[in-house]
Amino acid sequence: MEFNFLAILVAAIAPIVLGFLWYNPKLFGNAWMREAEMTQEKMKSGNMALIFGLTLLLSFILAFFLQNLTTHQMGAFALAQGELGETATYLAFMEEYGNEFRSFKHGALHGVLAGVFLFFPVIAINGMFERKSWKYIFINSGYWIVSLAIMGAIVCGWV
């Protein structure tokens, strides 16, 4: 099973693009700033080149993992222990199922599931211990659920 590195790269860019929209003052930006106790001065104090560079790197790692989560053929590949040309079982599986469930819709579904059942609990637990509001938790969780849906769609559907 080969990785589609172009799809992974495009998927890694998706959270950055969505972040520009999601955290824009016209959408959730003002509410998020209030709930995060963020100020304009604090926003300007960070090294934005470093922040966006690391964000892209971490998003790439996340997209790479999502390809394993959204693409069921990766499970068959793992069962074959990576020996593509030598296992008849893997070759029979791929002949039978090939690109089944390789769609944007299927990837988006798995992205949403990852967002709801993996990211939301982590963000909520951290938010509660940090004494953040549920509004803050839902703004950030919503962002990641939508981001993962888009990323999952890209890495699964881009065959």
Image (cartoon, rainbow, N blue to C red):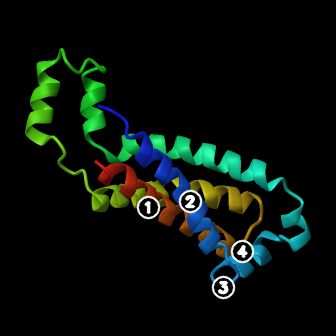
Q: Which residue is mark 4?
A: 32
**Nearest to viewer (mark 4 / mark 1):** 1
Question: Can residue 120 be seen from the camera position used here?
Answer: no
Considering only order in the chain, which callout, 3 or 4, is on the residue closer to the N terminus? 3
Q: Pointer 1: residues within 10 angstroms few (<14), some, or many (20+)?
A: many
Q: Residue at x 37, y 58 (%)?
A: 153
23 relative position to 144: left or right = right
Q: Amino acid at mark 1?
A: Ile
Which quarter of the figure has residue 142?
A: bottom right
Residue 156 higher or lower than 38, as above or below:
above
Considering only order in the chain, which callout, 3 or 2, is on the residue closer to the N terminus? 2
Residue 150: which disc?
1
Q: Which residue is mark 3?
A: 26
Q: Amino acid at mark 2?
A: Pro
Front residue of this view, candidates 113 and 6: 6
Q: Residue at x 29, y 62 (%)?
A: 105
Q: Secondary structure at mark 3?
A: loop
Q: Pointer 4: residues within 10 angstroms few (<14), some, or many (20+)?
A: many
